[in-house]
């Protein structure tokens, strides 16, 4: 069961990015009701990713690098970049949604462009992390955060 959780969470990243791309296209076409629905669905997909990821981190653990030692430093730098990018994208996403809900559409449009591009790069780097950890170099160990904290 636990082995499939990374694939599930990564799938939700991809679904979210695809929905954001569709929503952006709808906004350009001024199909604003459809844009709103698709973007909300994209936000829900991102939230599902986050819930699955955090739950897995707490109860199962994060997977350590299982590849060759000579690639570990490059992987860790890439992972750090992905984590920072994902954090920025999450804050931007919440800000962009808040601006829309408050009816501040001029600012929403400006933030939305940057947020969307940031989210696309987050999704791409997230899929890359998944590919490296689970497809190319599987076998890294996990340890639940609860075990680390409470031993």
Image (cartoon, rainbow, N blue to C red):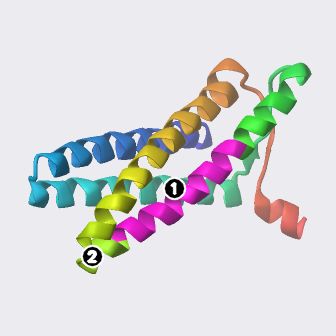
Residue drawn at (86%, 61%), measured in percent from left and top?
148
Q: Looking at the image, which is closer to me, 50 or 145?
A: 50
Reply yes or no: does residue 6 show up in magenta.
no
Q: Position of residue 99 (x, y in %)?
A: 33, 74
Reply yes or no: does residue 96 show up in magenta.
yes
Whether the residues at callouts 2 and 1 have beta carbons within 8 Å, the answer is no
Looking at the rendered image, the disc whose residue lies closer to the viewer, 2 or 1, is: 2
Q: Position of residue 144 (x, y in %)?
A: 76, 55
* Residue linked to disc 2: 104
Q: Looking at the image, which is closer to me, 136 or 35?
A: 35
Q: Is residue 54 left or right of residue 76?
A: left
Secondary element type, mark 2 = loop
Q: Which quarter of the rendering shows the N terminus?
A: top right
Magenta stretch secondary structure, dominant: helix
* Residue linked to disc 1: 89
Task: Choose the circle earlier in sequence order: 2 or 1.
Answer: 1
* Quadrant in the picture for residue 132: top right
Q: Is residue 52 left or right of residue 73?
A: left
Residue 140 visible in rendering: no
Q: Position of residue 34 (x, y in %)?
A: 12, 54
Q: Position of residue 124 (x, y in %)?
A: 51, 34
Extreme residue toward the bottom, this view: 102
The boundaries of the magenta stretch are 81-97
* Quadrant in the picture for residue 151: bottom right
In space, the residues marked 2 and 1 are separated at their CA atoms by 19 Å
In this rendering, the answer to whether 52 lies above or below 76 is below
Q: Looking at the image, which is closer to me, 62 or 1?
A: 62
Q: Is residue 128 left or right of residue 149?
A: left
Neighbourhood count class around disc 1 (C-alpha, 10 Å): few under 14, some 14–19, many 20 upward: many
């Amino acid at each position: 069961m636990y082995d499939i959780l990374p694939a599930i969470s990564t799938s939700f990243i991809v679904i979210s990015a695809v929905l954001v791309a569709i929503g952006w296209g709808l906004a350009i076409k001024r199909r604003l009701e459809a844009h709103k629905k698709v973007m909300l669905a994209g936000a829900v997909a991102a939230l599902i990713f986050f819930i699955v990821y955090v739950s897995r981190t707490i109860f199962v653990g994060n997977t350590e690098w299982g590849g060759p030692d000579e690639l570990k430093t490059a992987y860790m730098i890439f992972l750090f970049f992905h984590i920072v990018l994902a954090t920025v994208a999450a804050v931007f996403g919440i800000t962009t949604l808040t601006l829309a809900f408050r009816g501040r559409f001029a600012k929403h449009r400006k933030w939305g462009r940057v947020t969307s591009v940031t989210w696309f790069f987050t999704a791409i780097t997230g899929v890359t992390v998944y590919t490296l950890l689970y497809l190319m170099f599987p076998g890294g160990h996990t340890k639940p955060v609860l075990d680390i904290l409470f031993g």
